Amino acid sequence: MNRILPLSITLSSILLAQPITKIEYKGLMHLSHDVASEISGLHVGDEFDINKIDESLKKFYKQGYFSDIWISATDDGGLVYNFKEKSTISKLDMEGYSSDDEKEALFIEIGLKKGDLYDKKKIESAKKRLIKKIEAEGYYDTVVEVSVEPKEDSVALTFNVNKGEKIYIQNIDFEGANKIDTDELEDVLANQEEDTLGWLPGLNNGVAHVDQLEYDAFRAKDVYMKNGYLDAKVDEPLMRVDSGSYLADISYQVDEGEQYSINSIDIQGLVDEIDKDELLGELNLIDGKVFNIEKLRKDIALIKEKVANLGYAYTKVAPNFKQNRENHTVDIQFLVQPGNKVTINDVIISGNYSTKDRVIRRDIYLAPGDLFNLTDLKDSKSALGRRGYFEKVDIEQQRVDEDRINLLVKVKETATGSIQAGGGYGSYQHFMLNASLSDRNIFGSGISSSLSFDLSKVSRNYSFSINNPRVFDSEYSLGMNIYNSEYDFPTYQHDTFGFGTNIGKQLTRNLYGYVGYSYNNNKIDANNTTSSLISSVFSNEDLSYVKSTFNVGLSYDSTDDYFVPRRGMI
């Protein structure tokens, strides 16, 4: 309970008394007395001022640590703040949803963790997030109740979840849709009718995603905008659910309007370094063709990148439309606001606990003193992403002043090494043992290497490889491998030894060239065989051979991520 209103009554008897002689803070656990004094803004010797004391009370509540605060005065002119701090959450549990292994991550996702202060608003917010997450999985009428068990200076919370039932969509209707195929409209929706054999992976199972319903109307409208229907309207869907079968029908009200074609395209505000006619020729939108919102978005990005590559980091591009509703054409004008030219002040790297700074910097195509370039920024992020050293890569722009920015390179490292070992027994090879060790970023240097062996009664295999993709941080790479194997077959013995080396060079940001040499020596000994057939026909010299190979090649990689590439090609 916030005790602000009675404050003037509590202190009214001393308003005309001497200045504050002392200030006490009782019941503090999370704040020191020095910090509390700074927050209150009151000091010994100050006059009693109801407004200042009221304001200090509000400041303390804003800290979020206290469930109740009250203030009293002593007979000798002292001021006493009494605090009742909120309990901390000592235990979090969940029943009816999520496995034990997933609970901790789930609570963090909804904004809670052990050690947090117990706050009813925060708990209510966490409930809503949890319900929204469960609804996204297709469950209807989800109920979440939170039980609170008081403990000494703490509370234990248990989230009791009733997921309800899953809703399945049996029918989707677009009322008023005549000019666009309804299958094309449904294909973009998060909520779709069940496909034939929808239970198979990759096909739609018809489960409703209630949290996405409000966005599906925008997705359907986007289809119309891609086909030139600038005035199309798609109302929010109405979903009717049968409470017995939990089957749902979804209906949309559609006003399609007319299809528009492009009458003219113009660009205003371009910087002098760019030829407008040449840029107009590169646009995806074309005079006389049907308007397409997707191509418009690409053209906005294209114009922005062209201007930003000249140093204008804060370029803004806004399209203006002038529709002619009589002949159903549209004039498009792109308004460009380039702002000031910007240079790179510094490149600040964080999150690389293992990978060395220089390994990251050599894949960043912008350095202090360079003019800003948006393409360089995108290429830098892609280059770092496809190395395989990082789970996540972000490059943020931090404004220093009107003409300078810092690049904040934030990475989250991922595991790059692996150790594997195994064994077994077979009637032919008897006991078998194998192991391998590999790392594609040894000690954060960017060098990759692997070592393996495979042993049994009849075979012995060893291999080692190492590759440095940027020798001395140059554009050259150097790699080598060496291997040896021995096989004892019933009729002959086969030994192999080989090695290889290759030298490469980065020709462009995405194109690599390399030359290599490999040597392979195969030695076969048939003298110890119990059958003389092989040895009588072939000599050991005939069966053994040496092979040397030279190779030259090119490789291309413009993907943006080592693990899950979303753009680019190999």
Image: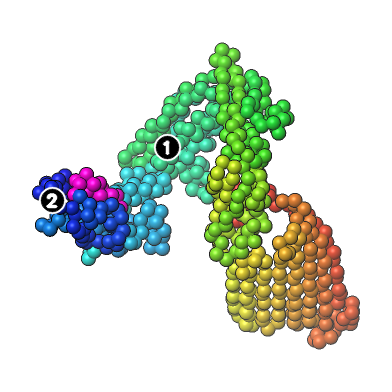
- Residue 61 part of the magenta segment: yes
Find residue 463 and report its horizontal and vertical position in percent.
71, 74
Find residue 513 and report its horizontal and vertical position in percent.
78, 56
Provide the residue designation for mark 1.
213
Q: Residue at x 75, y 69 (%)?
A: 480
Q: Residue at x 65, y 64 (%)?
A: 446
Secondary element at image label 2: loop
- Give amino acid for label 2: Ala
- Residue 287 part of the magenta segment: no
Crowding at mark 2 (Cα within 10 Å: few <14, some 14-19, many 20+): few
Provide the residue designation for mark 2.
17
Residue 31 vs residue 230, the one in the foreground:
31
- Give amino acid for label 1: Leu
What is the magenta range? 48-63
Name above or below for residue 155 compared with residue 434.
above
Name above or below for residue 165 compared with residue 234.
below
